[in-house]
Amino acid sequence: MNILVTGAPRTGKTTLIKSVVEELGKKTVGFITEEVLKQGRRVGFKIRTFSGLESMLASVDNKQSSVFIGKYGVFLDNLETVVKALEEEVKTGGYDLIVVDEIGRMELSSKVFRDFITASLDSGRVFGSIMLYDNAFTESVKKRADTKVYTLTRGNWVNVKQMVLKELKSLI
């Protein structure tokens, strides 16, 4: 069973994922997406894998990108390099969970990423976040019979965390 969390921006999806992964204490492969701040303003996003690989995902300064999501130019090469590294980690096995934060517009601009997500979901071992407002891909992910989606708000954060923890502990 795959478990995904969705919700509006800044409802604590990444924080919830980090907290759950830490509390579970299981071997994970995957990544967290984090904001890059400059003088208190968000100027981009980076991807950090659990094995220590870190790379810029998007930046307001990336003017040469072929893909823009709002004001952010996406570094497709960086994203695909991270995905290929994750594919190798998954092939070696020895993990309990694939953590994906997040299945969002920036990440979905890459076919390599979409293929990785599909293969990972087929394993039934994904815990992650997915954007709230759907496109065809995310709608199909949310409708999968092997996937449960929790909608996160600031008001239900603690309850969702407890439900997700309980569910994951019963699965892995």
Image (cartoon, rainbow, N blue to C red):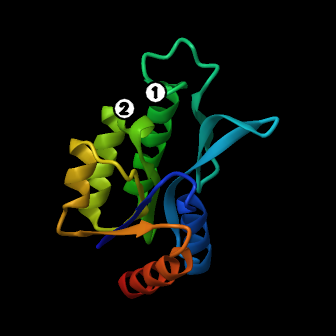
| Residue 66 on image: x %, y % | 43, 16
Residue at image position (33%, 46%) is: 116
Q: Quadrant of residue 83?
A: top left
Q: Residue at x 57, y 13 (%)?
A: 63
40 to 71, vertically: above or below? below
Q: Amino acid at mark 1?
A: Leu
Decide: is 127 above or below 49. Answer: below
In percent of width and height, residue 132 lies at: 38, 53
Secondary element at image label 1: helix
Q: Which residue is mark 1?
A: 76
Mark 1 neighbour density, 10 Å: few (under 14) some (14–19) many (20 or more): many
Nearer-the-camera pick, 94 or 39:
39
Residue 24 appears in view: yes
> Viewed as shown, does residue 168 lie left or right of 141?
right
Q: Within the image, what quadrant is residue 3 found in?
A: bottom left
Q: CA distance from mark 2 to mark 1?
A: 8 Å
Element class at badge 2: loop
Quadrant housing the N terminus: bottom left
Q: Amino acid at mark 2?
A: Ser
Measuring 50% from the left and 82% from the top, which residue is drawn there?
A: 159
Tell me which residue sits at (58%, 77%) in the image: 25
Residue farthest along the front direction in this orientation = 155
Q: Which quarter of the image is occupied by the C terminus?
A: bottom left
Marked residue nearer the N-terminal end (2 or 1): 1
Quarter residue 60 falls in: top right
Identify the residue under disc 2: 109
Contact? badges 2 and 1 (CB < 8 Å):
yes
